[in-house]
Image (tube, rainbow, N blue to C red):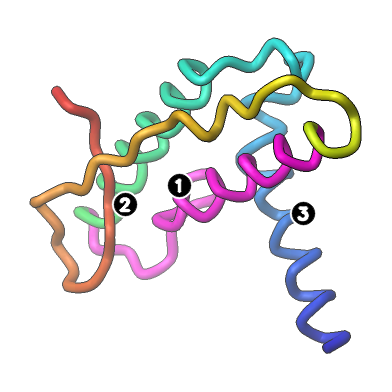
Amino acid sequence: MYLNTVYSINRVRGYLDSYLLPTFGDFQIDQISSSDIQLWINNQAQKAKKSVESGVRRSKKGEAKDFGAIAHKLSDIFDFGMTNFGLQHNPAKNILFHPSQNLTRKGLWCYRTKN
């Protein structure tokens, strides 16, 4: 149990340091909108798609293919704020993921914008 907890804490800290704080660190939490998060998701999708297409086995920092998990963790952070600090809504609940039909590796989900 302890090892799983330490692993989870380290993984979430990595999400914060590599993805969330560089993007949203200068915002007041109640000023982050669903459109801000959607733009970030779309950007992450493009980075992940390029990474998959390049054939590298390990993505660079900030270009993870599992950005969906990071987005869900962001939603968890907003839920925590609603429960414990009076935040009025969770803007991460309204984001959309668009599965790409152009996957280069079987079983890997990559997302793209509607364009």
Decide: is 3 above or below 100: below
Decide: is 40 above or below 2: above
Q: Which residue is mark 3?
A: 13
Kind of residue indicated by mark 1: Glu
Q: Which mark is residue 63?
A: 1
Q: Nearer the viewer, mark 3 or mark 2?
A: 3
**Are dots 2 and 1 in contact, CB under 8 Å?**
yes
Question: Residue 61 at x, y = what percent?
Answer: 55, 50
Kind of residue indicated by mark 3: Arg
Decide: is 23 above or below 78: above
Q: Quadrant of residue 39?
A: top left
Residue at point 76%, 82% (across, down)? 4
Q: Which residue is mark 2?
A: 51
Residue at point 31%, 52% (across, down)? 51
Kind of residue indicated by mark 2: Ser
Residue 94 in the figure: left or right of residue 73: left
Q: Quadrant of the N terminus?
A: bottom right
Question: Residue 115 at x, y = what percent?
Answer: 14, 23
Q: Quadrant of residue 58?
A: bottom left
* Label 3 SS: helix
Residue nearest the viewer, comparing 4 with 105: 4
Question: Residue 34 at x, y = what percent?
Answer: 51, 20
Q: CA distance from mark 2 to mark 1?
A: 7 Å
